[in-house]
Image (cartoon, coloured by chain):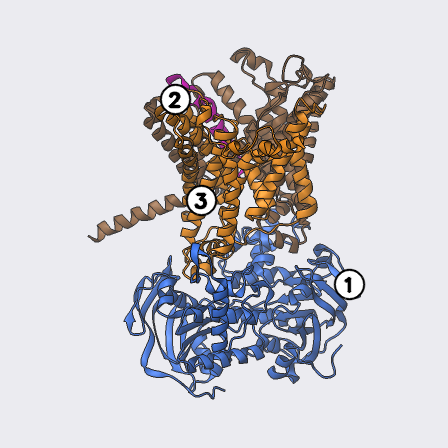
Amino acid sequence: MRDLAFILATTLMYSTPLIYGALGAVFSENSGVVNIGIEGMMTIGAFAGAASTYIMAEGYGHLWWVPWVGFLIGGLAGGLFGLLHAVASVTFQADQTVSGIAINFLAPGLALFLSRRLFENATTTPPIPLDAKLPRPLNQFFDLSSIPGIIFNQYASVYIAFILVFVSWFVLYKTKLGLRIRAVGEHPKAADTLGVNVYRVRYFSVILSGILAGLGGASLSMAIVASFRPTLISGQGFIAMAAMIFGKWKPHGAMLACLLFGATTGIQIYLGSPQVGLQVSANLLSMIPYIITLIVLMGFVGKAVAPAADGIPYEKGDR
Amino acid sequence: MEVNSKKEKLKSFLINETLILTLLSIVMGLLVGALIITLSGYNPLEAYRLMLEGIFSQPRYIAWTVIRATPLILTGLSVAFAFRTGLFNIGAEGQFIIGALTAALLGYFLELPAILHVPIVLCGSILAAATWGGIVGFLKSKFGIHEVIASIMLNWIALYFMNYIINQPGFKRPGTEASFDIHESARISIPWMREVLGPATKVNWGIVIALVITAVIYYLLFKTTIGYELRAVGYNKDAAEYGGINVNRSIMLSMAIAGALAGAAGAMHVMGVSFRVSVLAAMEGYGFNGIAVALIGNNNPFGVILSAFLFGGLTYGGSKMQTIGVPTEVINIVIGSIIFFVATYRIFRYVLVLFNRKKLQKEVQ
Amino acid sequence: MNTRQRNIDFDTPMIEMKDIVKKFGDFVANDHINLKVHKGEIHALLGENGAGKSTLMNILYGLYTPNSGEIWIKGKKVEVKNPNVSIAHGVGMVHQHFMLVKPFTVAENIILGMEPTLGFNRINMSKAIDDVRQISEKYGLQVDPEAKIQDITVGMQQRVEILKALYRGADILILDEPTAVLTPQEIKELIAIMHNLTEQGKSIILITHKLKEIKAAADYCTIIRRGKRIDTVEVRSTTENELASMMVGREVSFEVYKEERQAEDVVLKIENLVVEDNRKQEAVKGLNLEVRAGEILGIAGVDGNGQTELIEAITGLRKIKSGRIFINGKDITNKTPREVFESGVCNIPEDRQKHGLVLDYTIAENMVLENYRKEPFSNGIRLNFPQIFSFTEELMEKFDVRPRNKDLKARSLSGGNQQKVIIAREVTNDPDLLIAAQPTRGLDVGAIEFVHRSLVDQRDKNKAVLLVSFELDEVMSVSDNIAVIYEGKIVGMVNAKDTNENELGLMMAGGGHNGSEQ
C-alpha cells in the first residue's frame, strides 16, 4: 500500500509540469495555432520563476507571497514568448512550426544569457531557500508517514494544475469564449463572417498558452527542484505536446496522457529505489514511457483529429 | 544566345527573393544580438569583431568552424529533405545518436584494414539510422501516428538505448562514462593537416563526404524519378496518389533517407572527432540545430551548406566573445532571431509598404 | 415562370451601393459599380465566375474594404468596416461555400458570435435551442437545433445558413449561388422560401449565373461583367438569351453541337459495386453501369449520392468492398491507380487543385504526373527534362494554355487554364475511357465550351466518356445517355434527347422511374 502511495505521489509530482504545458498546447491548437514553442516557453518560465523568487527572497526575506509572485512571473515570462509567437503566426501569418522553433532557440538562449548576467556567469540559478519554495498546502492536515500523508505531500502547483484542467475544460466547452476559440480553430472564416475577431481570439489563446507553459516550467524549478539549470526542461515541452495530441486536443484527455507519462516515471523511480533494488538498468526503465506511448498510439488511438484549421494562418480578405 | 540564357539563369538563381529575405533575416538577427549585447553593457562591435576573428584569424579556427559545420550540413540536409517531401523530421536527433552508436560499435568491435573498415562503419551506421528513421515513416503510413510525436518518442528511446549499450561490460571504458575508442582503421582523420594545424584540431574527411552526399541528395531530389515522386507526395499527397505514386512507400522511403543522412552525421562525428560515444543526460542538439540549419537554408541542399557554415561559424566564433564577458548564449538568441525573421518575412514587406506609402504621401504633398 | 405577387416597396431603398471600386493589386475586381435594392425585392446579381459579384457582396457584408465608393443601408450612409457593422444594420449573408463549423451543433452555429449567456460567461444552451426553434418555425425553415452539422444534409445546412442571418435580425439577405448543391425539387422549395421571406418584408440579393433561377425567382437583375456593371433590368421583360449575352458580352449558345453516333462495344462495365465512404458508411450500394465506346454517358445526381466514391473506386483511389469493375473485359477491381491508368482509364478529377495538379510543381512537371517514369520522359531513374519541356510546350500550344510559360507553377494559373493543363495531359494519354467529374466547375463560358468540345471530340474518336456533373443542364446538353444516381444506385437510365428536367429531377430526388430500374 505504502509503495503504491509512493508511486502515486511521484506520478502526481512528475505529471504536473507536463499538464501545464499540455493545457497550453490545448488552448493554442484549439484556436488553430500550432505551438511547438511550448518547450522554450517552459524553459523561460522555469528560469524566470526560480530567478525572481531567489532575488525576491534575498531582498524581502521569506514572505509568504514571494513564491507566488515568482510563480506568476514565470507564467508571464512564458506569456511574453506566447505574444511573440502570436505576432509571428497570427499577424504575420508565419509558418507556425518555424516560429515555434525560433522560440525554442530564443527563450532558452535568453534564459541562460540572463542567468549568466544575473548570477556571476553561472548557468544554474542559486537554490531557492526551502521556505521560499511554493508551499505544500495540505501537509498540515496529514501525518506525513500515513498513506494520505505520502500522497498529499504535494506542492501547491500540483493542485493548481488539476484545478486548471477543470477550468480549461469548462472554458472550452461551456462558455462563450470557448465556443469562439474552437470555432476559430475549426473554421476561422465562418467565425469571421459572424463578427468574431479571429485575430483577437488567436492572440488570446496563444498568449494564454505561453502563460500556462511558463507556469509549467516554474512548477518544475520552484517546486520539484529549487533552481533553474540548462537541462531542467530538456524535452518536457515536446512531451507535453505529444500528450496533448495523445489526449485528442482535449484538456482532460491531455491530463490523462500526462498522468501516464508521470506514472511511468513514478514506477521507474520506485523500481530503482534502494528498498526495491530491482536489478534493472535505469536506462532500460527510462525508455518505458516512450515505448508505451508508441504502442498506445498504435493500438488504441488511431488517427486523432486535429482542429480543422490547426496550423493554417488566417488572412482576412483571403480570396 | 545560349550563354546569355545561362547567365540569366545564374542571375535569377543568385538574386531571388528568398535569398534576399534570408540575408535580411541574418542581418536583423545580428542586430537583435547587438542590441542585447549593448543592453547588457558591452560594445557590440567589439564582440562581433572577436567573433569574426574567432572564425577567420587563424587557419586552426577556420578548420574548427568547418569541423563544427560538418555534422550540421548532414542533419540540416536530413531535415530539409524531409521538409521537401512534406515531413517534419524532428527525429534527426535520435537518428544521429543511432548513427553514432553504430559507428562506435562497428569501429571498436570489428578489426579490418582501413580501406574496408571505414566504408563498412559508415554504411553500417547509415543503414541503422535509416531503419530508425524508417520506423517513423512506417508508424505514420501504417498507423497514422504523426511523425513529430513518433520522432520525439524515438529520440528519447535512442538516447537511453545508447546509454544502456555504453554501460555494457566490454564496451564501456572502465572509470569513464564513455565507450572505448574506435580503432585507427575506422577513423577518417587527416593526419598531415593535424600536423600543420596542431594536434588538437580534429580535421577529418567528413566535410568532403558531407559535400558529396549533399550533391547526391540534390541530384536525387531534383533530377530523378524518385525525387519527383517524393516531392509530389510532399506537395500534394492526393495528386501524387492520383498520378499513381505509392504514397505510403514514399513516406517510408523519405523518412529512411532522412534518417540515413542524420545517421551519417553521427557516424562521421564518431569517426572524425570524438572516436567514442559518451553517456548523455540530455540531447546534444545536433538534430535540433539541424532544423535551424534547414530553415535558414530554405530547405535547399546548397542553402543548407551555407547555412551550416553560418551556424558553425556563429557557434564557434561566438564562444570567443566570452573573453570580454559576453555570454555565449547570445548566439542562440541571434540564431533564434534569424529563424524568427525567416518565419515572419512578411514583416519586411510590411515595412516596405509603409515606407513606400510615406514616400508617396510626401510626393503628393 | 415567375408568377408571384410582387411585394416591392419602391419608396424604401434598403441597399444603395454607389461607385464601388475594389482592387486586388493591379486587378480591378469592382470598377465603379452601383446597386440599389428595395424593401421586399429579390434582386439578382448575374455574372460569370470571377466577374466580381461575390467581391461586391463581400464588400457590402464588410469582409472586404472597398478602395472607394459609398454604401447606404436603409437610407443611412454606413462605413462597413467588418461584418459586425453590416450585421448590426440588418445585412445577412449565406455564402456559397457554407460557413459552418462541422463538429458544432446547428444551434451552436447559429448563435456563434451572439451567444446568450448566464453567469461566468456560460452559454445558455437551452435558450439558444428555444430561440432557434422559434425562428425556424416563424419562417418555415425546419431544422433540428441539436443535430451536428456533419450529420445533416446539404439542403439542411443551407437552412442553417439562412437561419444564422435571420437570428441576427437580418432584413437584407445575400444568397451566394445558393442552388449549386440542391436538387431541382429543393431549388423549388428554396424559391418558395425566398418568396415567403419577401412577403414578410425582407429583401434578398441573389448571386447566380443560372438564368433559369433568375427568371423563376427575381424581380430585378443587375448584370456584372469583368468588374463592371453592364445594366440593371426588370426580369419579367427580359429573355434568358438577352441576359446571357449581357453576361458574356457576345451571343452565346448553351447547346453543345454533336453529331449522331452509334455507340459500340462496352468499355466500362460495373457489376454490383459496393464502396464505403470515409466514415465507413456504404456510399455506393450495389451499382451497375455500362459505358460504351463512342458514347458520352452522363451521371445526373445531387452531390453526395455516391458519385465521388464511384469515381474513386473506378480509378483505384478507394477500396472496393464488393462487386467488380471491368475495362474492355479486363478485371480492374481493386487495382492500384497506376494499374488502372495502364488499362486505359484517364480521369479529369472533381477537385482539380486537390487531385489533378501538384500546385507547387511547374506546368511541365504536372504534364508528366502519370508518365514521368516512362520513355521518353525518363529512363526509369533520371528525368529527361528536355523531352518533358518540349512535350509540355507542344501541349500548351495545342490546348492554348496561357500564359505560355512551362516554368510557371500550376498555382499561378487561372482555374480555366489549370483545367486545360489537366485535359491536355489526360486526353493526350489517348484513354479508352475518359472520366470527367465536374469538369466545368468554376470556369467561365469560354472555358466551359472548350471542355465540352474536348469531351465530344473524345467520343467522336470512338472513346468512352463518363461525365459526372451536379449541373443538370450540363449533363443534359453534353451526354448521349443519362444515368441517374440516387443513394449509391443507378435509379434510372434515359436517352438525353428523350428526357426533360422534370423527369430527371424526380429521379434525382429518389422518385423512381418506370422500367429501367436495375
Tell me the blue chain: C
Dot 1: few (<14), some (14–19), or many (≥20) neighbours within 10 Å?
some
Residue C458, quarter of the rendered image: bottom right
Q: Colour of chain B?
A: brown
Instruction: Depth check: give the residue in front, B349 or B37.
Output: B37
Q: Chain of mark 2?
A: B
Task: Give the residues drawn in magenta, as a range.
Answer: B298-327
Residue C256, quarter of the rendered image: bottom right
Dot 2: few (<14), some (14–19), or many (≥20) neighbours within 10 Å?
many
* Dot 2: element: loop
Q: Chain of mark 3?
A: A
Residue C158 x, y percent position in the rendering: 52, 70
Does the residue at mark 1 contact the one at mark 2 (Cβ under 8 Å)?
A: no
- Left or right: where B215 falls relative to B118: left
Q: Chain of mark 1?
A: C
Q: Identify the mark at residue B326; answer none if there is no mark.
A: 2
What is the distance, in whole Å, between disc 3 and disc 1 at their CAs? Answer: 51 Å
- Left or right: where B1 falls relative to A289: left
Q: Is there one chain holding both mark 1 and mark 2? A: no
Dot 3: few (<14), some (14–19), or many (≥20) neighbours within 10 Å?
many
Q: What residue type is disc 3 on? A: Leu
Q: What residue type is disc 2 on? A: Val
Residue B115 x, y percent position in the rendering: 70, 20
Q: Is residue B306 magenta?
A: yes
Q: Which residue is mark 3?
A: A208
What is the distance, in whole Å, between disc 2 and disc 3 at their CAs? Answer: 33 Å
* Dot 3: element: helix
* Dot 1: element: strand
Q: What residue type is disc 1 on? A: Ser
Q: Which residue is mark 1?
A: C322
Q: Colour of chain A?
A: orange
